[in-house]
Amino acid sequence: MKKLSFSFIVILIISIILVYSCSNEDVESESSTATQYTLSIKASEGGSISPDATGIYNEGTQIGLSAIPDEGYRFVRWSGSDRDNKNCGWVRPGNCRATFTMNSDRNIQAFFQINSE
């Protein structure tokens, strides 16, 4: 009877150690891998975006971009940012900034128009 009890206790202890070590490894590997998202940026004809930030970013990264119109063009609007700001170029000629947080894959585009004035 003592052999059975001793064997049972040893098997129980080994089982608990194995279960704990396996579940602990899973938690560590999940928490050490950051979620990443892809940023694609594009400017329409008549301008550019600075910096060229196309790439892969960790979740929560904050990005700031400037729309820079070419000579004879003006900035019209952003598409794909957190605050797509229409008519920024009409209110404040020149550069216009967009800021956003990487919380999903993003396709950001800046639109420019020929300056008719």
Image (cartoon, rainbow, N blue to C red):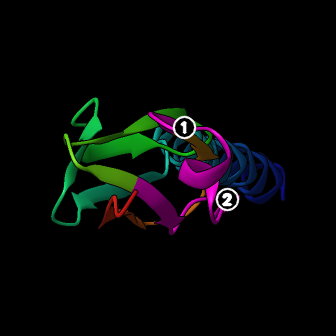
The answer to whether residue 115 is left or right of residue 85 is: left
Q: Callout 1: few (<14), some (14-19), or many (20+) C-alpha neighbours within 10 Å?
A: some
Instruction: Magenta stretch: give its range.
Output: 75-96
Q: Nearer the viewer, residue 5 or 102?
A: 102
- Secondary element at tag 1: strand
- Residue 16 placement, left or right of 25: right
Residue type, numbered disc 1: Arg
Of residues 71 and 9, the one nearer the viewer is: 71
Q: Is residue 44 above or below residue 66?
A: below
Q: Position of residue 39 (x, y in %)?
A: 34, 55
Asked whether, in this view, residue 84 is left or right of residue 64, the answer is right
The percent coordinates of residue 29 (x first, y second) are 48, 43
Query: Can you say whether 96 is above or below 18 in the image?
Result: above
* Helix, strand or loop at mark 2: loop
The circle drawn on residue 97 is: 1
Front tag of 1 and 2 = 1
User: At x 75% / y 57%, what residue is drawn?
Assistant: 8
Mark 2 nearby-residue class (10 Å; few <14, some 14–19, many ≥20): some
Q: Where residue 13 sits: x, y (%)?
A: 72, 43
**Rendered image quadrant of residue 46:** bottom left
Q: Quadrant of the N terminus?
A: bottom right
> Does the stretch in magenta take in 86?
yes
Residue 102 visible at all: no
Q: Quadrant of residue 57?
A: top left
Pick whichever, 26 or 11, lies toward us: 26
Location of the C terminus (image quadrant):
bottom left
Residue 63 tag number: none
Say which residue label 2 marks. Answer: 82
Q: Residue at x 23, y 60 (%)?
A: 42
